Image (cartoon, grey):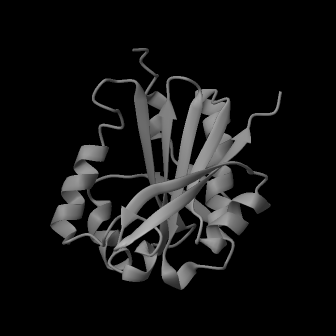
């Protein structure tokens, strides 16, 4: 498998209002209370972290920033307000060797509907094109998650597929949409 250069995975990103810090185990204590909000997990097959310690262990594993076979890079950022210690969410991306990248995000409940998701996702998407020469970025969204659907459509992502029964969680089957944003040529 082709190995991807890991150096850009350590980059701090910023926007006018946000600082995206490469995720470290030390972020667990800072993010745990926000990530304990069960409302954040309505449309994803995860549960809130069991403890700050368990979250720190997970973040320690993610600090490798690389899949076991070296074929993908895992990018994770803790996102805070510029000039503040207040964290508003986090962003994730997986850079695949075939030129595709997957994007995901969380905006913590007190900070939703303030434009932070668009700001952080646009920054990460554009960074994936620039630093990793991605040819496209895709997202997978539960079909019931109207807020995320509206977000990615506002960013120019195009719906390309319906994935029926993509997951089963919380006693229910979940269908997903796959959206893609292709790099401009």
For the C terminus, the quadrant is top right
Q: Seen in the image, is 104 located left or right of residue 60?
A: right
| For residue 89, side relative to residue 18 (left or right) | left
The percent position of residue 39, horizontal first and vertical second, equals: 43, 82
- Quarter of the image for residue 160 reads top right
Please give the count of numbered marks on the rendered protein: 0
Report the residue at 30% width, 24% height from top: 69
**Residue 142, x across and y down, in percent:** 54, 63
- Seen from the viewer's position, the closer of residues 21 and 163 is 163
Above or below residue 65? Residue 59 is below
Residue 16 appears in view: no
**Residue at the image position 67 percent from the left and 35 percent from the top:** 136
68 to the left or right of 166: left
- Residue reaching furthest to the top: 1
The answer, for residue 81, to whether it is visible in the render is: yes
Q: Is 142 in front, or is 139?
A: 142
- The answer to whether 31 is drawn above or below residue 14 in the figure is below
- Most distant residue in the right direction: 185
Tell me where residue 184 appears, x and y as whole percent. 81, 33
Q: Position of residue 81 (x, y in %)?
A: 55, 70
Name the image quarter holding residue 56. bottom left
In the picture as drawn, the residue positioned furthest to the bottom comes out as 110
Quadrant the N terminus occupies: top left
Is 15 or 145 nearer to us in this picture? 145
Q: Classify residue 24 as left or right of residue 161.
A: left
The residue positioned 55% from the left and 23% from the top of the image is 98
């Amino acid at each position: 498998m082709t190995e991807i250069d890991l150096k850009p995975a350590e980059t701090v990103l910023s926007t006018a209002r946000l600082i995206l810090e490469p995720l470290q185990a030390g972020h667990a204590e800072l993010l745990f209370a926000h990530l304990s909000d069960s409302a954040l997990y309505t449309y994803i097959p995860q549960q809130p972290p069991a403890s700050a310690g368990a979250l720190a262990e997970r973040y320690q594993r993610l600090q490798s920033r690389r899949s076991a076979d070296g074929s993908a890079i895992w990018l994770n950022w803790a996102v805070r307000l510029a000039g503040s210690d207040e964290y508003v969410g986090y962003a994730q991306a997986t850079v695949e060797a075939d030129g595709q990248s997957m994007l995901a995000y969380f905006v913590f409940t007190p900070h939703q509907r303030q434009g932070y998701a668009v700001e952080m996702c646009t920054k990460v998407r554009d960074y994936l094109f620039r630093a990793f020469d991605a040819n496209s970025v895709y997202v997978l969204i539960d079909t019931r998650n109207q807020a995320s659907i509206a977000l990615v459509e506002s960013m120019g992502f195009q719906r390309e597929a319906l994935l029926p029964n993509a997951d089963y969680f919380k006693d229910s089957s979940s269908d997903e949409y796959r959206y893609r944003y292709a790099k401009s040529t």
